[in-house]
Image (tube, rainbow, N blue to C red):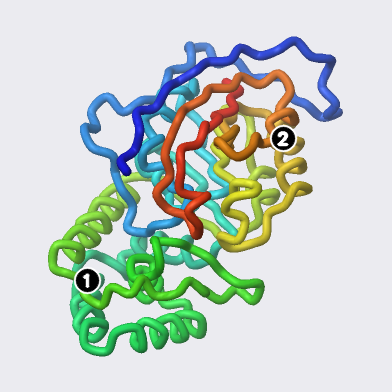
Amino acid sequence: MGAKAGKIINRKPKKTSPSLFANDSPLIVSNEPPVILNLPTRTRTVVPPIKCQGIKSKLVKFISQSIRWSGKGRWIEPFLGSGVVLFNVGPEKAIAADTNKHIIRIYSEIKAGSLDESIARDYLEESGKTLLREGEDFYYQVRDRFNSTGSPLDFLFLSRACFNGLMRFNKKGGFNVPFCRKPHRFRPALITKICNQIKRIREIVNAKDWTFTACDWRETLRSARPGDFVYCDPPYIGRHTDYFNSWGDKDATLLAQHVQELPCGFAVSMWMKNKYRTNEHMTEWGACEVKEFSHFYHIGSTESLRNEIMEALILRSE
């Protein structure tokens, strides 16, 4: 089932009582009017080499065109995930953070030059041949090895050979997604596609002043200052909460409090509702502007997580 066309709905902020947060900071107004980030010269979305549930490949244009920011500060992402929003917005300065050290390591090595498309091609071609010959036994060998060494190349392999492109770790930090049961997975066309993605990411990060760091989202938010812009794409409560760390109701509520205390503009991606239920945490965002976008997710551990959903983008301009 293909992705359905998105329908965008704007909601204006509601009038509410004064903020409950004591250290709310006044917004800093630039001498120049903020601009709307968009992708005027990009005809195709930059797709990262790492797959995971909740990836925003189909939403990056909607997100970037909804944000008003001068671009003079730093773009800050406490939940980098696949990195697709960062790579498509393309700010000059950025702090890209995630608690998932494996994501941070693979992009740090691409930036440092210790992982490139040539190295990836050699690895994937050899591993693909072994997978075709030995099947799932080899997949689980690679998974065990990755859980011992954290090899970025093994992580890349698992991301493309696991069931339904899921990224999931157990409580001990071990990757635990089963095999996709497709020994022929790494055909030449797919390997070339992955290598081209790595090349494009390498070209982007080498031209920017970006820092990749593995740390808790609270620590990342504390680094924000006036003129920056924070984009949050946290685990979707009730949907993708075992991505790397656990994420529960208390985390979602705490995030809403901390983000609304920021001294800069922000945007937060959340799910609003689907045919099964509505996200009750939407009420915690007070007078923020909300934009909605109807979207279909193809990646999920169960059929109930692979369906149409109403996305919400919660916004406050600088």
Residue 125 position by quadrant: bottom left
Q: Residue at x 43, y 44 (%)?
A: 297
The answer to whether one can see residue 318 in this image is no
Residue 146 position by quadrant: bottom left
Tell me if 157 is positioned left or right of 119 in this view: right
Q: Dot 2: what SS? A: helix
The amino acid type found where label 2 is placed reads: Glu
Q: Residue at x 60, y 61 (%)?
A: 242
Residue 134: % across, % down = 27, 89
Residue 61: % across, % down = 36, 30
Other-residue count near label 1 (Cα within 10 Å), few / some / many at <14 / 14–19 / ≥20: many
Image quarter of the N terminus? top left
Q: Nearer the viewer, residue 110 or 238?
A: 238
Looking at the rendered structure, which numbered label has been put on residue 186? 1
Residue 42 position by quadrant: top left
Tell me if 3 is positioned left or right of 237 in this view: left
The correct choice, above or below, for 145 with respect to 197 in the image is below
The amino acid type found where label 1 is placed reads: Phe
* Residue of label 2: 280
